[in-house]
Amino acid sequence: MLDYFKTILVKVSFDLKLFEKELKKALKSLVGKEIEELKNWCYSKFGETHDPVLQKCFT
């Protein structure tokens, strides 16, 4: 599932609202270590462009 959500997030990254919606869905579906891995991946991939959304979803 983690790889699936990564693929979706890359595809919707052009739209901040859609990105946030899909990220929230991912966080509801994943557990424990998967969430931490997704968080690290999101910050490395989208940290510069989507930081406000990432801060909102991961805090």
Image: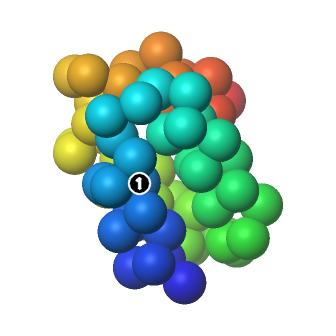
Residue 41: percent from left, percent from top? 31, 55
Question: Residue 47 falls in which quadrant of the image?
Answer: top left
- Label 1 SS: helix
Residue 7 seen: yes
User: Which sits in the foreground, 27 or 21?
Assistant: 21
* Residue on which disc 1 sits: 9
- Residue 26, how many percent across, how many down? 63, 61
Please report the residue visible at 56 percent of the width from the left and 27 percent of the height from the top.
17
Q: Please give the name of the residue rendered at 22% of the width and 44% of the height, measured from the top-left corner.
A: 44
Is residue 56 toward the left or the right of residue 16 in the image? right
Residue 46 lies in quadrant = top left
Which quadrant does the C terminus fall into? top right
Residue 58 at least partly seen: no
Residue 57 placement, left or right of 52: right
Q: Residues within 10 Å of mark 1 (few under 14, many from 20)?
A: many
Pick the front one: 20 or 36? 20
Please, which residue is most extreme toward the bottom here? 1
The image shows residue 7 at horizontal and vertical percentages of: 35, 68
Q: Quadrant of the N terminus?
A: bottom right
Q: Amino acid at mark 1?
A: Leu
